[in-house]
Amino acid sequence: MTAQTAQGDRTADRTGADRGAADHPSCGGFAAAVASEWIKLRSVRAPFLCLLAGLVTTGVFAFYYASIARINGHPVQPVGNAAASSVVLVQFAFVVLATVAVTSEYSTGSVRPSLLWVPRRHRVQAAKAAVVAAVAFLAGTVFAAVGTAVAWGAFGGRASFEAGTVLAQVLAVGVYQALVCVLSVGTAFAARHPAGSLSVLVTLLWALPSVLLGLGGPQLAAVVGRLPHGAGDRFLRAVADAPDTAATAVLTVAAWAAAAHLAGLYVLRRRDA
C-alpha cells in the first residue's frame, strides 16, 4: 500500500513537472521563440552582407540623386527625399534578408526542429517576422540618416533642412522597410523556396509598378499607388500634392504585409501541420 502510494506520488510529481515545463516560456513561449530567431539570424553571415549592401547602396544612391538635382538645377526640395528615393533599390537588401531567414531553414532541414520546439505555427512565423522587422526598422532608420547626411553636401544648396521633416522621413523609411520584411517573411513561408519568393517579391515591388508606369495613364498610375512601393513612396517623400494622406499610405502597405503574413501562415499550417 505504501509502495503504491509512493509510486502514485512520484507519477503525480512527474506529471506536474512536465506540465510546468510545457508552460514555461523557455519551452516554446513567444519570448523564447523571438530569442531563438534572433540567435539564428545573427549567427550567419548573410544578414550582415545584406545590411552592408543596403548601407552602401543608400549612400551611393543618395549622393547620385542629390548631385543630379544640383547639376540640373532642380527646385529646392527636402533633403530627406534623396534617402527616401533610394528605398526603391535598398528595399531588396531587406527582402533578401527576410527571405533567406525563412527559406534557409527549409533548404537545410532545420525547420523541423524549429517546429518541434515551438509547435504553434503562428508563433514561429510571428517570432521570425518580429525579429526581421525590428532589424529592418533599426537599420532602415540608420541608412536613411546616413543617406540624408551624404545628400546634404551633394545637393549644394538645392535642398531644405527642417528637423521635423527629416526625422519624419527617416522614421518613415524604417517603418516601410519593416513592413517589407513582414511581407517578405509571409511570402517566403508561402513559397518555401528562395527563387519563388524572390520572383514574387521583385515582381510586386519593382517589375509590375515599372511596367504599369511605363504604359502610362491615370488609371494605371492609381493602381501603382495601391501597390506596396507605390503606396510607400507616398509617405516616404515629402510631397505637398500627394493624393493620399501618409496614414492611408501606411495602412495600404500594412494591408499587403498582413495579407502575405496570413497567406504564409495558411500554407505553413497546411503543409507543416
Image (spheres, rainbow, N blue to C red):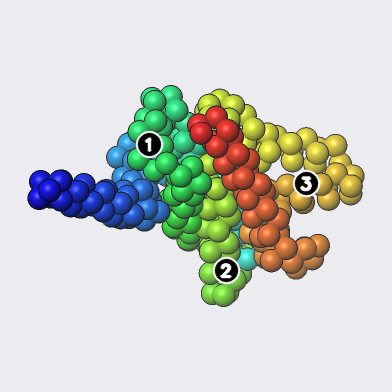
Rounded to the nearest angstrom, the CA distance separating label 1 from label 3 is 41 Å
Q: Which residue is denoted by mark 3 in the rendering? A: 224
- Secondary structure of the residue carrying numbered label 3: helix
Q: 132 left or right of 218?
A: left
Name the residue located 30 percent from the left edge and 51 percent from the top edge.
19
Counting from the top left corner in percent of width and height, residue 12 is at 23, 51
Rounded to the nearest angstrom, the CA distance separating label 2 from label 1 is 42 Å
Label 3 is placed on what type of residue?
Val
Q: Decide: is 82 above or below 211.
A: below
Label 1 is placed on what type of residue?
Leu
Name the residue located 73 percent from the left edge and 47 percent from the top edge.
227
Task: From the viewer's side, name the closer residue of 5 and 80.
Answer: 5
* Residue 116 image label: 1
* Residue 130 image label: none
User: Which of labels 2 and 1 is toward the front?
Assistant: 1
Name the residue located 53 percent from the left edge and 69 percent from the top edge.
167
Q: Are marks 3 and 2 in contact (CB under 8 Å)?
A: no
Counting from the top left corner in percent of width and height, residue 44 is at 32, 36
Q: 143 left or right of 225?
A: left
Counting from the top left corner in percent of width and height, residue 231 is at 71, 54
Circle 1 Cα neighbour tier, 10 Å, few/some/many (<14 / 14–19 / ≥20): few
Q: Which residue is denoted by mark 2 in the rendering? A: 168
Q: Is residue 132 visible?
A: no
